[in-house]
Image (cartoon, rainbow, N blue to C red):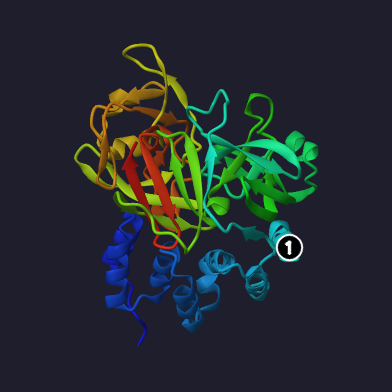
Amino acid sequence: MRPSRHPGARRAWTSGDVEEAARLAAAAGDERLLVLADLVRGRFEQALARYESLAGGLRLRALDEPVAHAWLHLERVDRACEHLRRRRRRVPPDLALRREHPMTVKAAEPVRLPFGDHPLAAYMPAVEGTLNGHQTLLHLDTGGTFLVMGAERAAATGVETVPNGHRFHGVTRTPVRTGIARELDLGGALLTNVPVDVIPTLTGPQDLVIMGTCLLRRFLPTVDTPAGHLLLAPRGHHSPPDGTRVPFYLWGDHFMFARGGYGPRRDLTFFVDSGLVHLLEDLEDGTIRQAAVLATRGQYRSWGIPGADLAGTHLKATHPLRLGPLEQSGHLLSIAPGRSAPWSGFGGVRVDGLLSQAFLAAYAWTLDFDRYEYTFRRG
């Protein structure tokens, strides 16, 4: 007898209620959905065991890349490549490089890195590091992978690259090259063979080096904007501090999402993207402020915002914005062009918008990749 697919489980999954989706899928015996629920909650060994018990050939093709990412999270690049080959998928150049040059992390003690000075530091904090012997300012961006930089910066720091397809930078589709940084020293936390994505859009005023979620998850990191520093503690040896805990989920290698809300809606799903920098003029006092959210007009309408309020490029929130139980008022909301966005869904989970550093900056927030929880403390 074939297991059924519970329609309520699928609806819960689409809305981002992962726990309810997993509960209903377990009752219905929907192992395919349970694989996805395990993956986004960081239960990689369990997800892989479920996946191996499934049968279905091409019906499981949508799981090919998520399962490869599970092996990558377990630091088994060789198994990820083997899985893709077995599924008759192309092994991308970045995985081939990572297999040949395994990354290492040495961090015996927590390191505290003060935020550096930069025109964008108030909106996208940065810390100093030594990249291939070059002093480099690294901007923190949970919407990024490992290290992301432009072609000029890669050449200047000695990172050799090869083509690696296309990717979205914000809403812009751009070609990507990939390479390996030999060494990155973050105040005594030493990483070798760090993967690098090189995109042509990071040039001129946007000539930034980005340090993303794939790198941060090698630690127990705390981004303390009120105190002006990043704390990197070794994973597995330190407990997160007391504070407000908010579960998060992880799609692919770096797309973190969490439940939130706006006004009466408490069932929204946000892509937590601290690298989102949309600077806008406050409609009331003319000051320049960072948008807290980026979403399309259609997404905002689904929040209950009237279409008449969405004629411009942005608007001021008339209701509180929420992440878990956290609540803030008076933020600016930026309107993305077009009817859809590349980040509008992760594995079938509907994403209702991007949540930026403008919301996160009020807290010291710890990202625990063992418990899949954020911990927020007021500065």
Quadrant of the rendered image containing residue 317: top left
**Residue in view at x 63 percent, y 59 percent:** 105
Indicate whether 60 appears above or below 336: below
Give residue 90's position: percent from left, percent from top: 69, 64
Does any portion of residue 342 appear in the rendered image? Answer: no
Give residue 368's position: percent from left, percent from top: 42, 56
Does any portion of residue 286 appear in the rendered image? Answer: yes
Q: Is 272 or 315 nearer to us in this picture?
A: 272
Q: In terms of secondary structure, where does tag 1 sit?
A: helix
Q: Is 346 or 157 nearer to us in this picture?
A: 157
**Residue in view at x 27 percent, y 77 percent:** 27
Quadrant of the rendered image containing residue 206: top right
Describe residue 155's horizontal placement relative to residue 227 as left or right: right
Q: Is 58 or 40 nearer to us in this picture?
A: 40
Give residue 279's position: percent from left, percent from top: 47, 23
**Residue in view at x 31 percent, y 75 percent:** 26
**Residue in view at x 48 percent, y 45 percent:** 343
- The residue furthest front is 109
Describe residue 183's horizontal placement relative to residue 118 as left or right: right
Give residue 232's position: percent from left, percent from top: 51, 50
Indicate whether 161 appears above or below 275: below
Quadrant of the rendered image containing residue 104: bottom right
Indicate whether 363 appears above or below 368: above
- Tally the numbered discs: 1
The residue that label 1 is drawn on is: 96
Is the C terminus in the top left, top right, bottom left or bottom right quadrant? top left
Residue type at mark 1 is Ala
- The residue furthest left is 264
Describe residue 257's horizontal placement relative to residue 137 as left or right: left
